[in-house]
Image: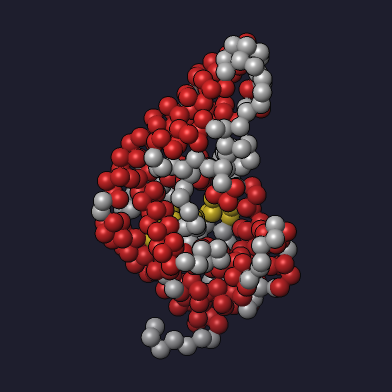
Amino acid sequence: MRVLSGVQPSGKLHLGNYFGAIRPQLELQAEHECFYFIATYHALTSVQQRADLEAYTLEVALSYLALGLDPSRTVFFRQTDVPEVCELAWILSCQTPLGLLERGHSYKDKVAQGLSPNHGLFAYPVLQAADILIYRSHLVPVGQDQKQHIEMTQDIQAKFNLRYGEILVRPEPLIRPEVAVVPGIDGRKMSKSYGNAVELFCPLKEARKRIMSIVTDSTPVEDPKEPSRCNVLALLRLMASPQEVADWEDRYRRGGTGYGEAKKRVFELYEQTLGEARRRYEELSRHPGEVQRVLADGGRRAREVARQTMREVRAACGLVNALD
C-alpha cells in the first residue's frame, strides 16, 4: 500500500520527532511504498526567512537520510518540487465547506495560544488534503491527536468524488498505539516551540547538558521513587532493553538510586542509539550536493504520479490545459 507522510522544516529535529514519528516511518519502508516529503509550503505559515527555510530543509533531509531512509525504496522529496499540489489545493478549496475548516482543532488551538491567524494557517487542512490525495495515498501515519486531519481529508475527498466521480482515493489514518509521547526536559511533550527538546545531532556536550537538566522532583537519593512519574525513566524506556528498564524500575522502588545516575545512563543510551547515525550525518553534511540530488530525484518521481492525478482531475472538472 502507498504511505504518505510529511515533516515541516521548522527547526532541528529532536528525540520527540525520532521516537514519535521518524522511527515508525522508517520501519514502514520494509512493507509499503512510501512517499515522504519535506513540507516546505506548509512551513511558510511559521518560517518566513529564506535563509532559515533553506537551512531547515537541508537539516531535515540530512537527518532522515542519516537515520536510515532509503531513497532507492522511498520517494523522498521537497513539497515545492511538485507545484501541482497547490493547483489541487485550489480545486479542493472550491469543494470545502467553510465550517469544516472552522472546526479544525489545530487552528483553534493556535488562535487560543495568541497566534495571529492568516489564510495559510486557516486553509492548512486543504493543502494537507491535496498532499495526501494527489499521490493516491492509502495510509497516513498520524498520532491520535492528528486523526482529525485525516478525517477532514476524507470529507474533502468524498465531496470531490460525489461531484466529479471516483477519481481520488480515500486515505485511512495509520495510528500506532505504541507510538511514544516523548517528554521534554521540563516534563511537557518535547517540542521545538517549548524550548525543551534534546536535538538529534547537536554537539554531545550540549546534549549531555540538556539531559542532565531534566526536571525531577526533590525525593532524596535514599528514598524509594515511583518510576511511572519520572521524566528521566520515560526517556530511558525508549532506548534501553526491557530487562534494563525493569532493573531501573526495581532500583527506583528500593531506594538508594539518584536521578543523576539515571540521567547519566540516558545520555549513554542517547550516544549508543544515535552514534552511527551521527557519523552518517556528519559525512552527508560534507556532501550537500548529493543530498540535493536525492531530493531532486524524489521530486521527479513524485511529480510523475501527481501529474497523472491532475490530468484526471482537470478532465473531470472541465479544466483545459493545452500543455497536457
Give the image quarter of residue 126: bottom right
Vertical placement of 275 versus 138: above or below?
Answer: above
Q: Position of residue 215 (x, y in %)?
A: 61, 32
Q: Residue at x 62, y 11 (%)?
A: 222
Q: Residue at x 50, y 81 (%)?
A: 314
Q: Residue at x 62, y 28 (%)?
A: 216
Vertical placement of 207 versus 174: above or below?
Answer: above
- Taking the image as shown, residue 172 lies to the left or right of residue 265, namely right
Q: Position of residue 112 (x, y in %)?
A: 73, 59
Task: Say whether residue 147 is visible.
Answer: yes
Residue 213 or residue 18, whichever sits in front:
213
Vertical placement of 145 versus 322: above or below?
Answer: above
- Taking the image as shown, residue 175 lies to the left or right of residue 268, namely right
Q: Position of residue 49 (x, y in %)?
A: 47, 66
* Quarter that holds the C terminus: bottom left
Q: Position of residue 195 (x, y in %)?
A: 56, 46
Give the image quarter of residue 105: bottom right
Residue 49 or residue 317, whichever sits in front:
49
Q: Residue at x 39, y 30 (%)?
A: 272
Vertical placement of 113 versus 194: above or below?
Answer: below
Give the image quarter of residue 153: bottom right
